[in-house]
Amino acid sequence: MIHEEAEAVKAPRVEDRARVTGSTLYVDDIPFDRLLYVEILRSRHAHARLLRVDAARARAAPGVAAAITYADLESSTGSFPLAASRVDDLRQPARSFLARDEVGFVGEPVAAVAAETRAAARDALEALEVDYEPLDAVIEPEAALEPDAPRAHASLPDNLAFRLEAGLGDVDAAFRGADRVVRLALQSPRLAACALETRGAVAQWLPASEELILWSSTQAPHLLRSQLAATLQLRESAVRVIAPEVGGGFGSKRSAYAEEALVAILARRLAPRPVKWVESRRENLLATVHGRGQSAEIELALRADGKILGLRYDAVVDVGAYHPSCPAAAPELTAAAIGGPYRVPASRVSLRGAFTNKVPTDAYRGAGRAEATLAMERVLDAAAVELELDPIEIRRANFTREAVFRPPTGVALDAGDCPSALDRLLSACAYASLRGEQEARRNAGELVGIGLAAYLDVCAGGSSARAEAVVWETGGVRVGPAGDVEVFTGTSSQGQGQEAALARIASEILGVPPEVVRVRRGDTAAIHDGRGVAGSRSVAVGGSAVREAARRIDAKLRSVAAALLRVPVEYVERVDGGFACGGRRVSRAEVCLEAHRAASLPADTPPGLEELVHYPARGPISSFGAHLAFVSVDRDTGEVRLEKYFASDDFGRVVDLLRVEGQALGGIAQGIGQALLEEVVYDESGQLLTSTFLEYALPRASHLPLVVCSRGETPSTMNPLGARGAGEAGAIAAPPAIANAVVDALREFGVRHVDLPLRPEKVWRLIRAAEERGD
Amino acid sequence: MIPAAFEYRAPRTVEEALALLAKHREEARVLTGGHGLIPALKLRQETPALVVDLRRIPGLGDVEPLDPAPPSPRAAPPDPFCGGPGRSGGLRIGALVTHRALAEAPTVRSRCPVLAEVAALIGDPQVRSVGTLVGSICHGDPAADYPAVLLALGARVLIASPRGERLAEVAEFIQGPFETALEPDELVLAVEVDRSAPASSAYYKVRRSASGFALAAAAAVVEIEGERIRSCAIGVTGVTTRPFRAHAVEERLVGALCAHGFPEAAARGASDGQSVLDDIHASAEYRAHLAEVCIRRAVEKALSRR
């Protein structure tokens, strides 16, 4: 990675040593005494009536402590409540942690066994007796919405899972008045998040205090705590959720899962023994939510000069068998982000969710925005070809000029400054010479393409199609009598290392080195409220909360110093190692000690150095940029080689550069995977064909080209740090940039569109079809 | 991903191993590198009563020159996979020889550079350090790399059983997908290549993106006389249920002028009459096409090394 500018702080990545040497403790690594191990029996059928589940033989199997079925869930409500959603006609079929009388996807939990060893638990699954009566399964989402389609659930009248419609202006008039209408149908295939650490949870019930502790590899410990308390009918204060080190999630560990409830239910039965379930990789591919899964048609009404007059977006979302506990989150973001960084005077967006007999879909890095950006950036390229415009010019002609603008759904967004990011990209990649290289190689018979994508990443979950949500986060700072600093945050971590940024924010305000700041997160007993990690918001929103708490502590320290110095607080200055007024000084250690000892504090200064803040962001937070891909295509095999990749991003003010670089590169790698390799495949009966890494292709180091990153720092006005979100840009921008490059490479064959992933056979077929036509 | 319970034995001699196989027959599975067996155990696709681990048997990890002819003392050629012309002398590759050992062994690189070339393309460094050639061919994955090159080299498999030792041609040994000619009480001790490969040999593979296994691959061993191809052997893997020799293509190449490169259309229909794989990785039609591309590119690469 090459950086154009690098003035931001490069705090050392102290967390890496433990990770690469294996001493980081993930859920499965935490030692527990007298642990019991859980294995889950999962449905073999995509859709079936469950006639009988008999656990008697499993209960008698060697080493088994408990074997439970639906009938044993009485200590809970049987399912998690659905979080609020702003979509219409939201429907959820009856669902329970263990299937009751119907299974809706291959991998749905049917029974659970707890035993003395993992092997004994696994062996006991063989002793469970289950009778299924297979029912017709519905697999393709568009077919699922046809009137005569088989139903994904016998209890529902049809397969409509939700509707979401939004719009602005007179769209039909815009299309009537257009010089050209460009239409494109495209797919965002289902993806598997494949976090390096699979899911896992350990539960322990403490009978004396009537309290549940759950360690889980989750992105949202507080949300999980509330969901567990609701289903177990416990007070929230009786449930403590701890998210220790988490080895990736990418959105897939945000919703609460049946397995987390099952270990809790088993732990209550088997108290005080702790109960552990750790997902296998096969289960991870089978039963952890998938991402994306949208098939869309996008239409642009354009003037001959490329100006956008109107947009229609009509998509079917593959919901899977059930909504996850936060329903329709990605589709809402698609509706909010569909117009990208462009001025779209009139628009209509329509998304319909379809139940299918497959594992549910949910957030995946770039959730909703990636689908929107793929559609918009692809259709813009198609429009550029039809109108004989340069792909750069058509984008420049449409970038919004307003700082805060109202995209298709009418909800305000921070537009950033895409034109500047595009200019920086073109100079970083030496665009003219890239086009020159392309020309020369094309003349030599090669298939070479250049693709561009601009993006506006609507971060922070700050907007939906319908309303501006209040985006908040908690942050706390505590300074002990010895002067040590603890920072508390309601955001969590899936391994990004944002703790370093939070420590730096507090350390700068408090005038201490960042190494003395300890960041505590991922424990509902350490901080009672929070939103977890999702939507690239941990620093912008969580960091602003920490900043505010640190400022309050700093003010308190000054007033204690003023009391010790016996001067009014406005005369107190911070000096190296303490505070001073004129020639008199008091050390930081003395001030911290006095704040707790309170020997000589004035009446209006209460003792203690502890602040907790709920910080609301001022408005939507977004990041933006433009990416460019340079590819060649093997004419004989259809293989795509990504030769060069250039990224120009603007993440606002950067607090911690190394980790932001990590996010930028990781996002691009994941975007390359989406573009070239990744696709979840089910057969027509609903069996998962990509159920191991022999079939599901993840990007490896050998798939990644040299990536050249350049970065702007346009501060966000929505938070005092000026930070934007850095986590998802690459996963949003890389797929359309690479798709556009491949379509450009195939220009001589008249190819207008290729769906992701751009696998060799698909590309070869396009080439061959053109050759057979005699193009 | 937890295997069903099984007995584990690690005999110290071939005789002990054979006795275990004779006793347990179909109930036993043999472990060398484990890259085929262990995933199958974890998914419970295989539930053997006994696993016989060969890794403590001395001597099975060696690559031996098959005849006394020493490798030529000439300086190493610039291409690491390009041996000098006119060498003689084969190899015996023991059952525990890893892909990495094959890729790196000087004897292999000088006597049979194309075999080292293939070994170096398998999996990733971790796989190459543990997986074995013999394990791979006994596992019988129709998309594995070795069958193509072993077919082209006319390699043989040295098999031991209570009845003694026998040699089987690789072409007979490989019977179908995950199927070999090995009897339940038999053990493969080694693979033998009975003469050195000409320098003008090469391997070309189009990978499956998920696993790196061959979507299609071809190994070409080309003998050149003067300016022309004297003879040629081409093995193809990944394309069909049973890796095969492309005899029709080989015949078309005999007598071709090397300087003219690969004759137009000579690879056409290379997999005709074969049972071509059709699965989520690729359609049969695409695989048959790739077979032709891989053959052409392997031969071109081989000719470029003469």
Image (cartoon, helix red, strand yellow):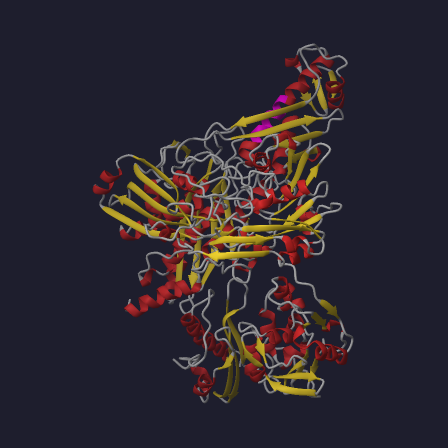
Establish if A551 lies above or below B95: above
- Which of the two residues, A456 or A37, is positioned nearer the viewer here? A37
Residue A585 counted in the magenta span: no
Establish if A301 lies above or below B5: above
**Residue projecting furthest to the right:** B12
Q: In the figure, residue A352 lies in which quadrant?
A: top left
Q: Is residue A495 visible?
A: no
- Which of the two residues, A56 or A742, is positioned nearer the viewer here? A56
Establish if A186 lies above or below A83: below
* In this picture, residue A634 sits left or right of residue A68: left
Q: Is residue A208 visible?
A: yes
State which quarter of the image contains the C terminus of chain A.
bottom left
User: Range of the magenta residues?
Assistant: A543-552
- Which of the two residues, B152 or A655, is positioned nearer the viewer here? B152
The spot of residue B154 in percent (x, y) is: 57, 85
* In this picture, residue B280 sits left or right of residue A504: left
Establish if B244 lies above or below A107: below
Who's the residue at 36% across and 50% down the image? Answer: A378
The spot of residue B140 in percent (x, y) is: 58, 75
The spot of residue A192 in percent (x, y) is: 51, 52
Q: How many marks?
A: 0
Specify the principal SS of the magenta part: helix
* In this picture, residue B4 sits left or right of residue A708: right
- Which of the two residues, A374 or A690, is positioned nearer the viewer here? A690
The spot of residue B198 in percent (x, y) is: 57, 84
Q: In the figure, residue B26 lies in which quadrant?
A: bottom right
